[in-house]
Image (cartoon, rainbow, N blue to C red):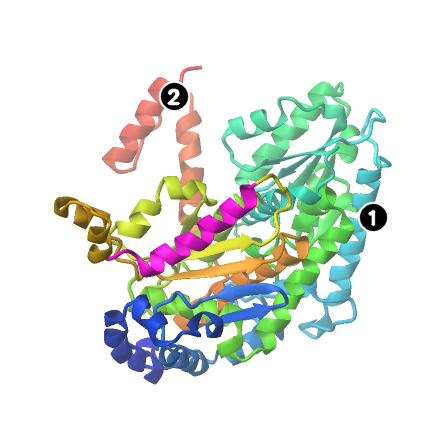
């Protein structure tokens, strides 16, 4: 595949010429020059409001960024994704998470087969199962109803379910207890289950491959934990374990009845799978109807992304602003700052979605890139972050782009809390953009020696995403917004956003080291001197 290198594209070069002037202009000037900027540089998609006016862009910047998207054939790449082409070239796979939320009557072909009916068959099976568990009809081995649900999975089979459970906790069935076990550190399993009654506990083993070390280790520990309590009767496994996987053979080998397996497909990437059967825990928690509302939200954003012109396309614009901030203004990180306690795991979820997707250093054709890719995503809910790391964002030497996320209506009205929360998110974006000049600081009577310490340079870019209320549908739109922004950035950077070869090496090396830690006799070690010493020290200190 030959294509013009990104940095040789006319729009890229024009942006490079354009950035010098842009660097000189402060957001204060941009707002002063255009009193309607805040109204103009904003979009509303189905109630999700995206204010990007506090980015260091002019109309010309946006025009050039859109031109860049056109030159990189973003339109064609979107069509290729939605059309089921194998755009994940290094794994030779289609990338079709959009099918997971397509309406029943849609047609989307993979290798000539319409896959929408398969998706809806699994959704129907999940619905029937969720209704039985939620209604108490599904009984455990001793005849007691299920009261506890433990999802065992890691990475894409964990972060989405955990995030969605927390985000939609308001809508959950409070008579069920949900836990999530991911880490191979036994503490995770032990703490998640220590207060649960095995006879009332259902495990969902969520693993696309059903071979992942952490998940299978936890699943076996769960099996032992259950059987120890239920007098070792292996028939109990069928009542207390279900699986979400693409690998029926491995599921059966574990002892789970494949009748109780919920399927998904290799065209769903792990980090794009929370709305597949991997979302079974989510459906059990919020109920099938809310789950379908979540899917409808995803779908609304999918359709917007697929059809809207780029200058009015929320995921495309978000992606292009990210490219501008990273490649032209030098912002290496994005702080995701949800002003909603329910979204406390959203930054962790986005870390995987964004960094596992776009943390790549070679192009689709395998050539090393000569530009930055993959922004670093991190964050915490506001207002908590304000009392910790915001200092660096306001007054440090680095440029940090921020995504503020807020909701006009709280799900938990409590006196003055929500107005205070909202005042803070609006104020933070304002403070970051406009700052406070030395003259303003002096005018407050600040002694001269203290003035530099109290100056806020401002000119810090941010997006603000505002929705009326955190509903399942709004969450779906929000996640799809980031999913598509990640893809659009990957298209600009000409990388494969859907593989993850970078997680392989550590896994392989760990497998090699396991026997060196467990062998009775001291093994002959052939690593470097640091690794050898760490292994020896561990063996000497581990006891038992
Ligand atoms: C996600 C990654 C990765 C994956 C986990 C779990 O895109 O591929 O995070 O989800 O390694 O894999 P399994 O679901 O196969 O256990």
**Label 2 – label 1 distance at C-alpha:** 53 Å
Of 399 and 200, the residue lying toward us? 399
| Marker disc for residue 521 | 2
Q: Quadrant of the N terminus?
A: bottom left
425 magenta-colored:
yes
- Residue under pointer 1: 128
- Numbered disc in front, either 2 or 1: 1
Q: Is residue 84 visible?
A: no
Q: Earlier in the sequence, mark 2 or mark 1?
A: 1
Secondary structure category for the residue under label 1: helix
Looking at the rendering, the stretch of residues picked out in magenta corresponds to: 416-437
Q: Position of residue 222 (x, y in %)?
A: 64, 29
Relative height, residue 9 to residue 412 (above, below): below
Q: Quadrant of residue 198?
A: top right
Q: Measuring 30% from the left and 36% from the top, which residue is drawn there? A: 526
Relative height, residue 482 to residue 452 (above, below): below
Q: Position of residue 213 (x, y in %)?
A: 53, 39
Q: Residues within 10 Å of mark 1 (few under 14, many from 20)?
A: few
Q: Quadrant of the C terminus?
A: top left
Q: Measuring 24% from the left and 57% from the top, which residue is drawn there? A: 437
342 magenta-colored:
no
Question: In the orientation shown, which residue stands out farthest toward the left?
Answer: 449
């Amino acid at each position: 595949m030959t294509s013009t290198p990104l940095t040789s594209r006319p729009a890229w070069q024009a942006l490079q010429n354009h950035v010098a002037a842009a660097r000189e202009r402060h957001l204060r000037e941009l707002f002063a020059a255009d009193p309607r900027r805040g109204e103009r540089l904003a979009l509303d998609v189905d109630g999700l409001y995206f204010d990007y006016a506090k980015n260091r862009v002019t109309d010309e910047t946006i025009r050039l960024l859109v031109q860049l998207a056109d030159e990189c054939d973003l339109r064609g790449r979107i069509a290729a994704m939605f059309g089921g082409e194998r755009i994940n070239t290094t794994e030779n796979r289609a990338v079709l998470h959009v099918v997971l939320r397509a309406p029943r009557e849609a047609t989307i072909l993979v290798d000539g087969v319409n896959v929408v009916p398969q998706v809806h068959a699994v959704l129907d099976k999940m619905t029937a199962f969720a209704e039985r568990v939620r209604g108490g009809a599904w009984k455990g081995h001793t005849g007691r109803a299920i009261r506890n649900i433990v999802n065992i999975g890691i990475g894409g089979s964990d972060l989405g379910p955990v995030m969605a459970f927390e985000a939609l906790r308001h809508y959950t069935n409070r008579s069920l207890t949900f836990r999530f076990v991911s880490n191979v550190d036994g503490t995770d399993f032990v703490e998640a289950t220590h207060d649960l009654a095995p006879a009332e506990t259902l495990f969902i083993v969520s693993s696309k491959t059903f071979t992942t070390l952490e998940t299978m280790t936890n699943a076996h520990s769960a099996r032992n934990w259950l059987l120890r309590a239920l007098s070792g009767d292996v028939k109990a496994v069928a009542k207390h374990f279900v699986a979400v996987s693409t690998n029926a053979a491995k599921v059966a080998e574990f002892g789970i009845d494949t009748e109780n397996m919920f399927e998904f497909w290799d065209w769903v990437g792990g980090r794009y799978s929370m709305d597949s059967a991997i979302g079974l825990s989510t459906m059990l928690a919020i109920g099938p109807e809310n789950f379908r509302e979540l899917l409808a939200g995803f779908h609304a954003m999918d359709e917007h992304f697929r059809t809207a012109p780029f200058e009015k396309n929320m995921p495309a614009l978000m992606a292009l602003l990210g490219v501008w901030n990273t490649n032209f203004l030098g912002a290496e990180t994005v702080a995701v700052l949800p002003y909603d306690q329910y979204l406390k795991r959203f930054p962790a979820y986005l870390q995987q979605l964004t960094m596992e997707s776009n943390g790549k250093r070679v192009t689709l054709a395998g050539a090393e890139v000569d530009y930055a890719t993959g922004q670093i995503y991190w964050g915490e809910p506001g207002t908590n972050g304000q009392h910790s790391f915001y200092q660096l964002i306001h007054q440090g030497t680095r440029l940090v782009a921020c995504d503020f996320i807020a909701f006009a209506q709280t799900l938990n009205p409590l006196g003055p809390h929500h107005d205070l929360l909202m005042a803070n998110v609006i104020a933070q974006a304002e403070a970051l953009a406009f700052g406070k000049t030395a003259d303003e600081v002096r005018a407050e009577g600040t002694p001269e020696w203290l003035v530099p310490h109290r100056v806020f340079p401002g000119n810090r870019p941010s997006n603000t995403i505002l929705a009326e209320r955190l509903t399942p549908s709004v969450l779906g739109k929000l996640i799809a917004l980031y999913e598509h922004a990640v893809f659009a950035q990957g298209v600009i950077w000409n990388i494969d956003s859907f593989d993850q070869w970078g997680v392989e090496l550590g896994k392989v090396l760990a497998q090699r080291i396991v026997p060196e830690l467990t062998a009775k006799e001291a093994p002959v070690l052939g690593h470097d001197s640091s690794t050898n010493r760490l292994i020896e020290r561990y063996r000497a200190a581990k006891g038992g």
